Amino acid sequence: MENYIIKNDNGISYLQFTKLLEYQDIVKHAISLKPIDIGSNDTFYNKQEAVYKDYEKMCTSLELDYNNIYRPYQTHTDNVKNVENEKPGIFTDEFREIDGLITNKKNKILSISVADCIDLMFFDPVKNVIANTHSGWQGTYKLISHKTVEKMVDNYGCDVKNIICCIGPSIRKCHFEVERDVSDKFYEKFKHLSNIDDIISKGKIENEKQKYNIDTILINKTVLMQMGLKEENIVDCGLCTVCNREKFHSYRVDKELAGRNTGIIALI
């Protein structure tokens, strides 16, 4: 059985994790599919009306109020911020250069934008705490997943053994191809991991240059398990955004023309 479903409703399609649907009386969530496009940091301003309509459609389907969306201005940092009593909105001053959001407050919709990067959705059903984290290759290298869990534990009293992490569609090892400089950087950072040879592999040779493939999903899984998350609580949808480019936006495929999917999660 798949660990996710694709729901079609209100003229849109989105992905949901079966693990989180077990708690749908407490938490609502979704990851959008094409043609929804919430825009990048740059393109959002030219398409605000369409973006708000897409948010409204998704939130209406989930019985949420789209006026309660918190969307940070993401810049591939390892900055994670608690959402408390700030006003909701898109790219508000309080949420600039933020790539992870955490809250234990109800009716606050945490929205992350992605186009190949990993959307990590966290939920502690005991403490009723959620987090939504944007982890591209830079965020993965900076251990933003570790910092998100650390903040959940330190600020909200979460027990790592109760935390669920759901991993959204993203570029996978099959298509995350890099050159020697990035490969060496990752090797130095993560060579202490016992599965480093599974994380980094030699790829093809192009123009007499050796390419390498990196498994950023496996890095995040390994880091989270080392922190004490249970293996069964780390749920990966297994979908590659490049392989499934007809369903998800991909920066690797479309470069500057790439749209953005969104993952949203909220306590109710």
Image (cartoon, helix red, strand yellow):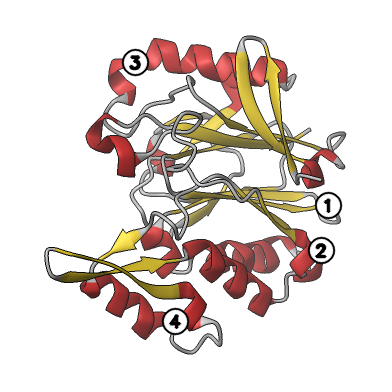
Residue type at tag 1:
Pro
Q: Residue at x 66, y 61 (%)?
A: 152
Determine whether, in the image, residue 34 is placed left or right of residue 162: left
Residue that badge 1 annotates: 125
* Residue 26 on image: x %, y %: 84, 38
Q: Mark 1 touching mark 4, by CB under 8 A?
A: no
Q: Tell me which amino acid carries mark 3.
A: Lys
- Counting residues from the N terminus, which is met first, the one under dot 3 or under dot 4? 3
At label 2, counting other C-alpha atoms closer than 10 Å, the crowd grade (few under 14, some 14-19, many 20 or more) is some
SS class of the residue under badge 4?
A: helix
| Quadrant where the C terminus is found in the figure | top right
Tell me which numbered mark, 1 or 4, is placed earlier along the sequence. Answer: 1
Return the residue at label 3: 47
Disc on the earlier residue, 1 or 3 = 3
For image coordinates 79% across by 63% down, the residue present is 232
Mark 2 or mark 4, earlier in chain: 2
The amino acid type, in three-letter code, at marker 4 is Phe
Residue 163 in view: no
CA gap, disc 3 to disc 2? 39 Å
Residue 114's x, y, as percent?
45, 40
Q: Position of residue 36 (x, y in %)?
A: 49, 21
Q: Position of residue 179 (x, y in %)?
A: 23, 68
Mark 4, residue position: 190
Is residue 212 or residue 103 the one in the foreground?
212
Q: Secondary structure at mark 1?
A: loop
Q: Amino acid at mark 2?
A: Asn
What is the C-alpha distance between the residues marked 3 and 4? Answer: 40 Å
Drawn side of residue 242 relative to residue 255, left or right: right
* Residue on which the image places disc 2: 162
Q: Quadrant of residue 194?
A: bottom right
